[in-house]
Image (tube, grey):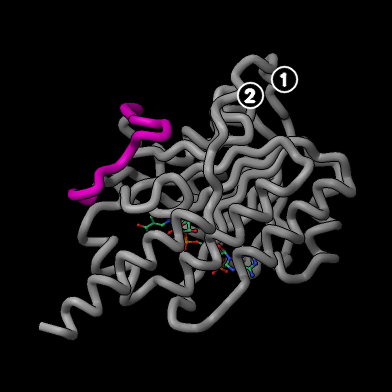
Amino acid sequence: MTVLICFILYAVFLSIGLARSGHRSRGLRADEAPPQSPTRVLIIGATGGTGRELVAQALERGLTVTALVRNPAKLQIDHPRLTVVQGDVLDAASLEAAMHGQEAVLCALGHKRYFHPTRILSEGTANIVRAMETHGVRRLVCETSLGIGDSAGRMGLYYSLFVLPLILPLYFWDKTRQERVIAGSRVDWVIVRPAALTNGPRRGRLRHGSRVGSLVWTVRVSRADVAAFMLDQLASNTYLRAAPGVA
Ligand SMILES: NC(=O)c1ccc[n+]([C@@H]2O[C@H](COP(=O)([O-])OP(=O)(O)OC[C@H]3O[C@@H](n4cnc5c(N)ncnc54)[C@H](OP(=O)(O)O)[C@@H]3O)[C@@H](O)[C@H]2O)c1
C-alpha cells in the first residue's frame, strides 16, 4: 500500500514537473497576417513514422523537399522533387549544409533511448534552431507530445500513471527542454503536440487546440493526420508561437 501511494505521488509530481517545464501558451497571435506558403522545406526525422508521412504529403502538395536522414537507404521514397541528405541533428555542420536555401523546417524527431538520460531532442533542436537563425529560415513546425506544458495530464490516466512515470520520464523531460529551446528562439515556430500516435489512414477529421486530449482516457491520432496538420501550419498563423494539441 505504501509503495502504491509513493508511486502515485511520484506520478503526480512528474506530471506537475512536466507541466511547469514544458511550454505554456500565452494566448494566440492569430492577428499576424499568414505567411506565404513555402516551396522548399527541410524535413527532420524523415525516416520515422510521422516523418515519412510528412515527406509523402509535402511532395503531394507540390513542395520541394530536402530530407535530412541518418541512413538514406531507410527512406525508400524516390521523387524528382526530393533530395535526401545524410546527416545527424547532433552534427551541427550537417544541419548547416542541409539548411542552405530552405524556406521552412518540419521536425518529427524522436528516438527509442527511453531509459538513458539523453538530450537528443533538446540538443538536436537547438542545432536546428541555430542553423535556421544563421540561414534566415523563418518557420519551424515541430512535433512534441501531449502531456507536457499546459497539456500535462492530457494523455489520459494510462499514460500519466503508467507509461510516463515508468517508461518515458527521461524522454519526456528532454521534450520539455526541447519545447523551451523552441520557445526561446527567434524563429516563427509552431509546436504540435499529438495524442498517442497510430499508423492509421488520414481521416481529415482532427481536433486541435489547447483543450485537446483527456485527463482520463487515452486519445489517439494517426501520424498521417498529424503530418497534414503540421503541413497546414507552414502557411497559417493561427497557432504561431503556440503549442496546440491534436487528436
Ligand atoms: N508514439 C506515440 O504514441 C507518440 C505520441 C505523441 C508524440 N510522439 C512523438 O512524436 C514524434 C514522432 O514520433 P514517430 O513515432 O512518428 O517517429 P519515429 O518513428 O520515432 O522517428 C523518429 C525519427 O527521428 C530520427 N532521428 C533520431 N535521432 C536522430 C538524429 N540524431 N539525427 C537525425 N534524425 C534522428 C529517426 O531517424 P532513424 O530512422 O535514423 O532512427 C527517425 O527518422 C516523437 O518525438 C515522439 O516522441 C509519439
In the rendering, which numbered label is found on residue 36?
Answer: 1
Q: Does 215 appear in magenta?
A: yes
**Rendering quarter of residue 9:** bottom left
Q: Main secondary structure of the magenta part?
A: loop
Q: Circle 2 sits on which residue?
A: 235
What's under tag 2, amino acid-wise? Ala
Would residue 19 be seen by someone viewing this image from the given angle? Answer: yes
The C terminus appears in which quarter of the rendering?
top left
- Give the residue at x 66% y 39%: 189
Q: If you read the primary sequence from the N terminus, does the residue marked by circle 2 or circle 1 appear first?
A: 1
- Tag 1 secondary structure: loop
| Figure check: 174 above or below 66 | below
**Rendering quarter of residue 27:** top right
What's under tag 1, amino acid-wise? Gln
Judge left or right: residue 218 versus residue 146: left
- Give the residue at x 43% y 40%: 226
Q: Do residues under tags 2 and 1 come within 8 Å of each other at their CB atoms? A: yes
- Give the residue at x 71% y 35%: 188
Q: Which residues are magenta?
A: 204-218
Would residue 81 be seen by someone viewing this image from the given angle? Answer: no
| Figure check: 237 above or below 141 | above
Q: Does 102 appear in magenta?
A: no
- Tag 2 secondary structure: helix
